[in-house]
Amino acid sequence: MDKVISTIDEAIHDIKDGATLLVGGFGLCGIPENLIIGLRKSGVKNLTVVSNNCGVDDWGLGLLLQTKQIKKMVASYVGENKTFEQQVLNGDLEIELVPQGTLAERLRAGGAGIPAFYTATGVGTDIAKGKEHKVFNGRTYIMEEGISGDFALIKAWKADPFGNLIYRKTARNFNPLAAKAAKVAIAEVEELVGAGELDPDQIHTPGIYIQKVLVGKNYQKRIERLTLARA
């Protein structure tokens, strides 16, 4: 089945108010830039977004914060985004902070159909409040639930018409996990190749997990925080 679509509007057409979105990316690396811009223009609101972080003030998911389209953010990191911080302090944005490894495992569990698991991460902290505790081999663990979503917005390097994906180096990050944990996964890619051109042994996300493929454009490749060595 050819899953390639031609426009951003077609890609995000089914995303409605109140949807839960799983968004790939780490900082500004491997984020679905075009799909996020499309969501901003669409005006869809009251979104619950699960992602490692929320971009920066003027790029990535930060664009959706500017327009207050996000109701709740589930993330492991708040830094680099003053808008995010201010909306949380003002009570305009709900937030669920999750340790980064736990967030990755919750997404993996959601994609694998695992409802919950136990981890020692967060025991004895605010993260553990209200969660089931259990002792295994003399060590205390807390129960964390798997995460799934209505849609995944992910970014890949290469795709074929069937939705088989290859990511480029660290831009892979949370993208494969998000793709598997959503009912509908929309992949934004830099390059589209013909059927059979991808080496099967190199495919990171099989096309069975992907419903739509969009070729992106005008990538900015921003640096989140520029650091220069002293002369």
Image (cartoon, helix red, strand yellow):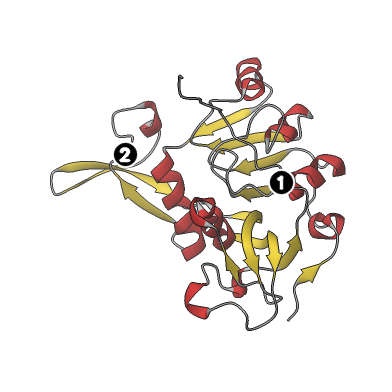
Closest to the observer: 118 or 194? 194
Q: Residue furthest left?
A: 138
Q: Which residue is labeled 2 in the image?
A: 121
For the point 45% across and 58% down, the residue is 109
Q: Which mark is residue 33?
A: 1
Please, what secondary structure does the residue beneath circle 2 have? Answer: loop
Query: Residue 13 at x, y = what percent?
Result: 84, 56
Q: Against 109, is 16 above or below?
A: above
Q: Residue furthest front?
A: 231
Q: Residue furthest bottom?
A: 196
Type of amino acid at the residue the image marks with label 2: Thr
For the point 75% across and 73% down, the residue is 3
Closest to the observer: 64 or 30? 30
The answer to whether any part of residue 187 appears in the image is no
Q: Mark 2 near mark 1, Cβ–Cβ under 8 Å?
A: no
Q: Is residue 102 left or right of residue 51?
A: left
Query: Residue 231 at x, y = what percent?
Result: 46, 19
Q: Which mark is residue 180?
A: none
Whichever of callouts 2 and 1 sits on the residue coming sooner in the sequence is 1
Q: Is residue 27 left or right of residue 64?
A: left
Q: Is residue 59 left or right of residue 127?
A: right
Type of amino acid at the residue the image marks with label 1: Glu
Query: Residue 210 at x, y = what percent?
Result: 65, 68
